[in-house]
Image (spheres, helix red, strand yellow):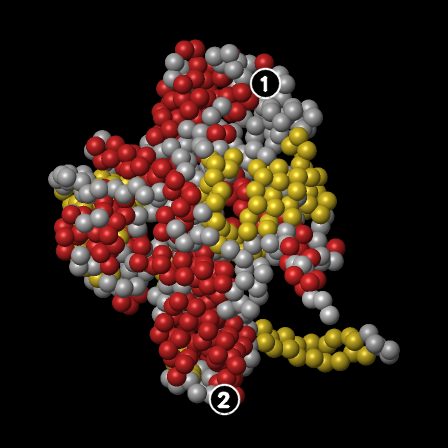
Amino acid sequence: MSRATDKQPHAADRHDLIRVHGARVNNLKDVSIEIPKRRLTVFTGVSGSGKSSLVFNTIAAESQRLINETYSAFVQGFMPTLARPEVDVLEGLTTAIIVDQQRMGGDTRSTVGTATDANAMLRILFSRLGTPHIGPPSAYSFNTASVKASGAITVERGNKKTVKATFNRTGGMCTECEGRGTVSDIDLTQLYDDSKSLAEGAFTIPGWKSDSFWTVRVYAESGLLDPDKPIAKYTRKEMRDFLYREPTKVKVEGVNLTYEGLIPKIQKSFLSKDKDALQPHIRAFVERAVTFTTCPACDGTRLSEGARSSKIAGISIADACAMQTSDLAAWIRDLDEPSVAPLLTALGETLDSFVEIGLGYLALDRPAGTLSGGEAQRVKMIRHLGSSLTDTTYVFDEPTAGLHPHDIQRMNNLLLRLRDKGNTVLVVEHKPETIAVADHVVDLGPGAGTAGGTVCFEGTVDGLRASDTVTGRHFDDRSTLKAETRKPTGALEVRGASANNLRGVDVDIPLGVLTVVTGVAGSGKSSLIHGSVAGRDGVVTVDQSAIRGSRRSNPATYTGLLDPVRKAFAKANDVKPGLFSANSEGACPTCNGAGVVFTDLAMMAGVATVCEECEGKRFQASVLEYRLGGRDISEVLAMSVAEAEEFFGSGDARTPAAHRVLERLVDVGLGYLSLGQPLTTLSGGERQRLKLATHMGEKGGVYVLDEPTTGLHLADVEQLLGLLDRLVDSGKSVVVIEHHQAVMAHADWIIDLGPGAGHDGGTLVFEGTPAQLVAARSTLTGEHLAEYVGA
């Protein structure tokens, strides 16, 4: 019997490529590409070249959209709606699991334990083994309040029957701080000026304008308070109504509104949110108005006394959550309880994943909002490491962000392990160490923004090295140590720093030079700088927290550039500046200044169509007749930063205030961005550099930067080093928390923390010049830096 037919490949085995044809998302220019499945593919290219647009906004977005469509319309109604990306053909897609760098949890109740399900398993464990037994798993949850109720209920079933019922639920929430671990005391002098009346604008809370229906007017016109009486002259009853009154229905101009005392209103609107997730001006207000102290009732554990009293082998759930995960994993392994064996195994595997991924130094009670972008991404990876799924597509966004060279090898091994299980792994990455382990490389470019969006190279790593692309040329670049370092002009003294895992660190941070603070992930770098340096006078901190903004926000509004531009237009045309704002008087009435009209289609993706009235220009036609230097306001917003710098630098449009802001944007390498580009389309690296440009105008003598090379291409790192040099040469002191060896080699002074992470770190292991560190090779950083510079 002939077996010749067996040599023909099965039809199902032919689908070994992901085919993308004609992708046009953001700046992509009809990109067509074939990506091998079950391989590790790295996408690289300069910042803003279109990597995220291709990987996240095209391939991963379409995969997720197709999966969402398999659910019923009812379920889809509860899911985020995704539009089909602009692409002609997408074939061979598999289920995409996205592990991005979005910061985790804007809620103060979100912790590392709640984000990884480790807390859920611990609660079950304590509800089964804890003594004394206090109740079900919810009794150990700091997010669950205890509830008691009793009364008559009517059950409508056959003959109606009224029955007496009592209900109670035991929760683990501390009643004093409501499960937040901190209690707040509000400084009333920051909320209002008591020498004024409500009608005179007594409130000093940001965003509370005197004509606001929902805030100021509900107090002034509620009928409960005299709007013309200074607050200082209120009676005791009026003061109680003003500050603490329970929610009460009132009528203001015939509209039913809810009046609520000022303190609970402030707590709900400002204090229930994570402080780091607030806009900068609101965060500044909260820091002024509110003092947070550790809750005295639960000692910051967030848990009720009952939950803390139940123990297993002398350890309460609060103690377990405060342990480093590496220690907690060891404690779990020592518990020998056959009745909960499957639970112990699952919990042990989850905790071992923390250690394996280099996060063994985290504790489960660490608030999720305090994790760096790289840490947040690795925490999200934990739930996928032990997964038995194969033939899925894992999509990573710079998984090495925030990792010391020592930890990058570990991350590479994890990516290869996921691939070897039969998965397609797509990684957006700049680090040569990770690009080097790829099976397939896609290099996008050649430039950024409108100068990018094309595929410059596809193939192997050796092929990339030999290619003449920007990445290929810079792939083997190595910085050299400085022949001469700058001399410090003074020092910032830090004494007895003990935040988080620091062990009474004493260090002098030199001023007038470029100082790099380094060490393995979790060694205490951020604790040292953010805990002991960042809050001081004259210190300007540029961190990695996300820029908050709607799709109406753009580089022009964020940097404050639009104010001088509007004034210049108003002066040149003798009209009001408000006309030149798409969020104010000059907005197109049809689209309210958005430039597009959104139609919500319930569980299907909403449709955004360009506004027919203003043709996407966002302004009324009459506003576009006013010109400055021959351009209207919509043409100015369409300019790139570099074009605008030239435009506002000379001639009729010369505006020094605008030109200064634009110079700073060009300085940080954002010359290619257009002024009106929505902030939501910027990459992580672009957002941090936008912040840096904004802060460069501040009157501070010390700049603290938190990993500014995140999201930067090898070629852009050189430009960043030039910028740091210019800052130092202009008389500023620059302190950089950084792992990138090029920045370390370029430093005048290095402070190295370690030797390990968590309780194995927190000590000063080296301070001196980079040359001394390389010569000594006494630390992990020293060894990797010596290898990097070829010493």
Location of residue 275 in the rendering, given as x and y in whole percent from the top left corner: 43, 52
Q: Can you tell which quarter of the image residue 311 is in?
A: bottom left
Label 1: how many Cα within 10 Å (few below 14, some 14–19, many 20+)? some
Residue 269 higher or lower than 505, as above or below: above
Q: Can you tell which quarter of the image residue 378 is in?
A: bottom left
Label 2: how many Cα within 10 Å (few below 14, some 14–19, many 20+)? few
What residue is pinned by disc 1?
623
Q: What residue type is labelled 1?
A: Val
Locate residue 536 relative to residue 301 in the image: left or right.
Answer: left
As drawn, which residue projects farthest toward the right?
A: 158
Q: Can you tell which quarter of the image residue 2 is in?
A: bottom right
What residue is pinned by disc 2?
338
Disc 1/disc 2 C-alpha distance (Å): 76 Å
- 302, 151: nearer the viewer: 302
Residue 299 in sight from this viewpoint: no
Locate residue 52 relative to residue 256 in the image: left or right.
Answer: left
Rendered residue at 39%/67% (across/down): 356
Q: What residue type is labelled 2?
A: Pro
Rendered residue at 38%/32% (across/down): 669
Residue 333 in sight from this viewpoint: yes
